[in-house]
Image (cartoon, grey):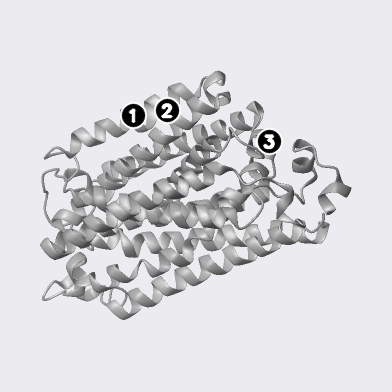
Amino acid sequence: MSTSILPVPSSIGRLERGALYAALLGILGLAAGYFSNPAQFYRSYLFGYLFWTGVAVGCMSILLISHLTGGLWGLVTRRLLEAGTRTLPMMAVLFVPIAFGLSSLYTWTHPGDDPILRHKAAFLNVPFFLGRTVFYFAVWILVASLLNRWSLELDQGESLRVSRRLRGASGVGLVLMGLTITFAAVDWAMSLSPHWFSTIYGIWFMVGQALSALAVVIVIATFLAGERPMSDVLRPGTLQDLGKLLFAFTMLWAYVHLSQFLIVWSGNLAEETPFYLHRTQGGWQHLGTFLIVFHFALPFLLLLSRDVKRNPRVLGTLATWVIGVRVADLYWIVGPDLLGHGHEAVPLSFHWLDVAAPLGLGGLWLVQFARELRRRPLLPLGEPEVMELVELQPEKAAR
């Protein structure tokens, strides 16, 4: 099918140009930070990398859910989610600086006489760590490639066989995502504090990544809502469905956080309690209170409103806020371990590189996202519901 039957919104070009400026500014800051303070550079880079890789992986999770559950919200956002998954090869390349900074980031790279680190050395060692990272990206890129290829086949005409293949692969894909995200979270984030462990940590990251990705997709969808073809399909009912999903993931985020706290509090074990002890003093408790109020309570109350969920400008603004508090939440989770290596409580502090890294990596991610978005029709025209919304007759679409 020709891609010329749908207009390419000029908003995508504006998004790419703005993201390019942000990327250049952030990368210049990162370069200056590397030469002035290499240790801080690696800490801030990992922080920014975790967030934006989480957005790409979260796009994959939401895409798999949409194929399994159906619904117009999934059709309207499918091309946005697919473009997000196609940024994963770039994120794999951007892992290289972290590989060079392992000894600066992770205490398990030099265990010394620590009996716990020596006991975990069979799993926490550099070759195995890098090998697992390669495996995670190989799985994610393979699943993304299959979903994108089969989805494009649907544009050639409705095919029940391809639709069933997508749905079946999505079930298997969700299982693979659950396993790989869990292990990646343990490797990249939890091992910053190798003496501490949590069985719910992977779910924590899965929910956060899905929430971040959903918020980013809502922001971009509402940004494109003023132009065709997005203006044809982003109706109030579809917006309301996206708002409901944002509401559901916000509640799930709060539930997982509360579950983690209750498990640690009820167990009261010496190897678990330091996680919260380090985050309830030195200023970190204020960031935690901020998250309770502005990551959960405020979005929860606003998203109860039907009018908020059906208004593209208001919902887009709220989703933008969610992205900001998602960054704060990630810093609350990994910041104390990045600064104190998980061994000691450190006061809450910020470095200008903690802004430059998410800005630079986020700019690169959005530039690649915008370029991928332009390579395909903005909507999956092989789906009858979409064709009906954009008022294309099948015979016209075939041309």
Q: As rendered, which of 234 and 54 lies closer to the eye? A: 234
- Looking at the rendered image, the disc whose residue lies closer to the viewer, 3 or 2, is 3
Where, by quadrant of the figure, is residue 250 drawn? top left
Q: Name the mark on residue 233.
A: 3
Q: As rendered, which of 3 and 59 lies closer to the eye? A: 3
Judged from the image, the secondary structure of the residue bearing numbered disc 1 is: helix
Judge the density around disc 1: few (<14), some (14-19), many (≥20) Cα neighbours within 10 Å: some
Question: What separation in Å lies between label 3 and label 2 (alpha carbons)?
Answer: 25 Å
Q: Name the mark on residue 299.
A: 2
CB within 8 Å, label 3 to label 2:
no
Judged from the image, the secondary structure of the residue bearing numbered disc 2 is: helix
Residue 299 x, y percent position in the rendering: 42, 28
Quadrant, the C terminus: bottom right
**Is any part of residue 269 visible from this angle?**
no
Quadrant, the N terminus: bottom right
**Is any part of residue 279 visible from this angle?**
yes
68 lies left or right of 288: right
Q: Residue at x 37, y 59 (%)?
A: 185
Judge the density around disc 2: few (<14), some (14-19), many (≥20) Cα neighbours within 10 Å: some
Return the disc, 3 or 2, that comes first in the chain's sequence.
3
CB within 8 Å, label 2 to label 1:
yes
CB within 8 Å, label 1 to label 3:
no
Q: Residue at x 53, y 41 (%)?
A: 11
Q: Amino acid at mark 1?
A: Phe
Q: Amino acid at mark 3?
A: Val
Q: Name the mark on residue 294.
A: 1
128 lies left or right of 79: left
Residue 168 x, y percent position in the rendering: 70, 60
| Above or below, comparing residue 359 to residue 124 in the picture | above
